[in-house]
Amino acid sequence: MPPDKPEIVGGPPFKPNFPKLNFEVPGYAGVAIAAFFLVAMFFVLGKPAYTVAPDEEGVVMTFGRYTKTTRPGLHFKWPWPIQTVERPKVSEVKRLEFGFRSMTRGTQTTYQDFSDNSLLLHEAQMLTGDENVVNVSMVVQYRIDNSLHYLFNFESPSAVESALQDIGEAALRQVVGDRPIDHVLTTRKFEVQSEVERKMDELSDLYQMGVSIVAVQLQDVKPPRQVEAAFQEVASAREDREQIINVARGYENERIPTAEGEAQSMLLEAEGYKTARIAEANGDVARFKAIAAEYASAPEVTRARLYLETMSEVLPKMRITIVDEATGIVTLKSLGGGGLPIPGLTPKASSSASGQEGGSR
């Protein structure tokens, strides 16, 4: 048997004497007040009113199941835990970085790229289609286009971002691996960006991630450091070649329209000359036919009129030279009667010369 408890020897037993508080409320008023306070606390702590910002959507869930989507503004719901609200920023353009990381310290932003970090180098280094090694850094911008897929198809927004990172790296490696290094370094960067954007859109739709790709921008595209100088010389030569080709094409584009315009002008001028000559020939034919008809009716009169008209057109344009064979003196006379004065010519000789107009012309 356990030993008996020792008997406490001392004064009388201790009896606490606290003041008695009386909270009694007569009737059912106490129950009503308690219920009111409970309901009030339930609504206050459960936050039945919520606000959706202009760049957000409100996704309302009842006991964890999707109920509805609300637009920006003030809305009401059942308090927690009956209904809860997620408010993803559907207008915000988010950013993913490949091959480098930006770090913000206060108002200054610094960048760490693949040349300073082996992990980033592993992310940026890839093989081209012509079996060259190239280091590529890239920026991808995206935004939410389906709130339900974005919130419920993955564990969390960070899981969506991680999946997009993997998709972007896979798409970039595939596009670069299908092309020669020249396309990535110099001539076809825009095509590479467009192809990566298209593939990322396809994969994100396939996995129902609830996002859309806004833009893809290649940043630094460099060969490895060991051969960077040689690649820069090759790239510079290619750029010079492209510049010369562009200058030649510009000259071509300038000269061809000019030559075509000149050719068109010559054709139009020839057409005009052709039309004028045909019209003139037709007029001559019509005139000849009219004269022939008049000649048939009055030959002598028509012959005299034609002779006089021809002489009136021809003679004013002629200068006649008359030579006096007896004296060897030459005088020039115009049809108007005024002769050029010749020194030593006597009036008799002048008369003699005038009488011999039938001499040589």
Image (cartoon, rainbow, N blue to C red):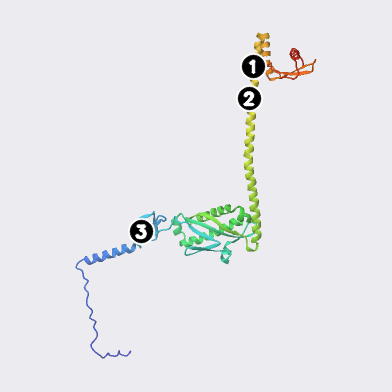
User: At numbered mark 1, what does the secondary structure look like: helix, strand or loop?
Assistant: helix
**Residue 65 x, y percent position in the rendering:** 40, 59
Residue at horizontal 63%, vertical 56%? 181
Is the residue marked by circle 3 packed among few (<14), some (14-19), or many (20+) residues within 10 Å?
some
Left or right relative to 121: residue 343: right
Q: Which quadrant of the view contains residue 70?
A: bottom left
Is the residue marked by circle 1 packed among few (<14), some (14-19), or many (20+) residues within 10 Å?
few
Q: Residue furthest left?
A: 26
Residue at horizontal 63%, vertical 22%? 279
Are the residues at dot 1 and dot 2 in contact (C-beta closer than 8 Å)?
A: no
| Gap in angstroms between the C-alphas marked 1 and 2 | 16 Å
**Residue 14 x, y percent position in the rendering:** 24, 85
Check the image and report above or below for 232 versus 298. below
Residue 255: which numbered mark, if any?
none
Q: Earlier in the sequence, mark 1 or mark 2?
A: 2
**Residue 67 x, y percent position in the rendering:** 38, 56
| Gap in angstroms between the C-alphas marked 1 and 3 | 102 Å
User: At numbered mark 2, what does the secondary structure look like: helix, strand or loop?
Assistant: helix
Q: Which residue is mark 3?
A: 50
Task: Pick the residue in front: 17 or 188.
Answer: 188
Residue 287: which numbered mark, if any?
1
Check the image and report above or below for 145 versus 275. below
Task: Pick the residue in front: 203 or 3.
Answer: 203
Of the two numbered discs 3 and 2 in the rendering, the one whose residue sits closer to the viewer = 2
Is the residue marked by circle 2 packed among few (<14), some (14-19), or many (20+) residues within 10 Å?
few
Residue 276: which numbered mark, if any?
2
